[in-house]
Image (tube, rainbow, N blue to C red):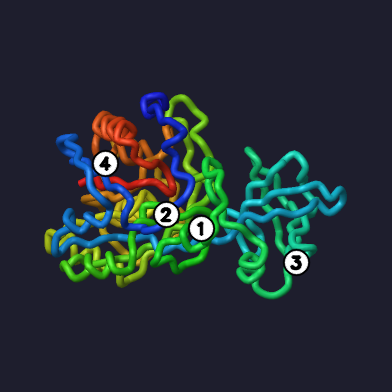
Amino acid sequence: MNIEEFNYDLPESLIAQTPLKNRDESRLLHLNRHTGDVSHHTFKDIISFLKAGDTLVLNDTRVMPARLFGLKEDTLAKIEMLMLTQIEGDDWEVLIKPAKRIKVGQKVSFGEGKIIAECIEEQAQGGRIMRLSYEGILQERLDELGEMPLPPYIKERLDERERYQTVYAKEVGSAAAPTAGLHFTTPLLEAIKAKGVDLAYVTLHVGLGTFRPVSVDNIDDHTMHSEFYQMSEETAALLNETKARGGRIISVGTTSTRTLETIRAKHDTFVSSSGWTDIFIYPGYEFKAIDGLITNFHLPKSTLVMLVSAFSTKQYVLNAYQEAVESKYRFFSFGDAMIII
């Protein structure tokens, strides 16, 4: 399957640069996954697509302010570092700009030495393993020195950090937000529960794969990067109960979906577990966990467009995207949403 099959034309003017003032007033496109029919709504109408007995699954990861700007110790060259994944102890997988300046053994100082990062391994495409040293607690140093790691297509600065967090964000560790969840407000979640819909939480820390484009023509040759996930006993029990009673599992975002599908594929049921997943979902994949998907609009030729296409059909999804473009929906992280059910 060729990567160009997942391409579409998107005017740059439709790439959302800032979040809406009110999270749940973004637009919502409904795609019937079986017929391809499309209808248009406001996100707060999401409740009308949910039924008593359903379970809504949300990713409670919390984004780290993990973009740091510092100076190379020997030359004082300006360096940007995006922290992605904690490998072990204070060793982190990062992206470095400009990467050619940082070789093994070289150090970068952030905040006049409040964090020192030493390169211990070089990786491809700007990746490095850096060993950090700092005084006190790392999260406090990041809160002091770091910026939110907004995707490169967002050119505006974010004035309010919490707008790049979901209202239920809890487990610190992501390099990017699970953006489908940004539309929910606490009152909307309470209204959903009042309708008899259960809420369940999983964690998947969004990592390097989010920032890496697909660089092969044949998608079978693409390798997904691993990301850490975990599911509690409480969530596993609730999801198994939902399936047993004939309720639907509605996944909020591709990250929740990848977590659920990973666990169900490994165990043929939901179990309390944690680990690393590199699951790559594209057309031909048979879903084992979810019955509905809430998601944003994704980049052309991305693995996320492939995942969404697998849940419906490639043609239905691309037709829906074309209608969203014609209707001037807002795209990507701060953009509008769709529900496929």
99 left or right, relative to 139: right
Disc with the residue nearer the chain's start (4 vs 3): 3
The residue depicted at 43 percent of the width and 30 percent of the height is 11
The residue depicted at 24 percent of the width and 55 percent of the height is 250
Residue marked by disc 2: 178
Residue marked by disc 4: 311
Circle 1: is it few (<14), some (14-19), or many (20+) Cα within 10 Å? many
Marks 1/2: CA–CA distance:
9 Å
Disc with the residue nearer the chain's start (1 vs 3): 3
Residue 236 makes an appearance in the image: no
The reply to whether the C-beta atoms of the residues labelled 2 and 3 are less than 8 Å apart is no
The reply to whether the C-beta atoms of the residues labelled 1 and 2 are less than 8 Å apart is yes
Q: Tag 4, which secondary structure?
A: helix
Residue type at mark 4? Answer: Phe
Residue marked by disc 3: 114
Q: Residue furthest front?
A: 21
The quadrant of the picture occupied by the N terminus is top left
- Residue 193 at what x, y percent from top left? 22, 69
Marks 1/4: CA–CA distance:
25 Å
Marks 1/3: CA–CA distance:
22 Å
Residue marked by disc 1: 174
Residue type at mark 2? Answer: Pro
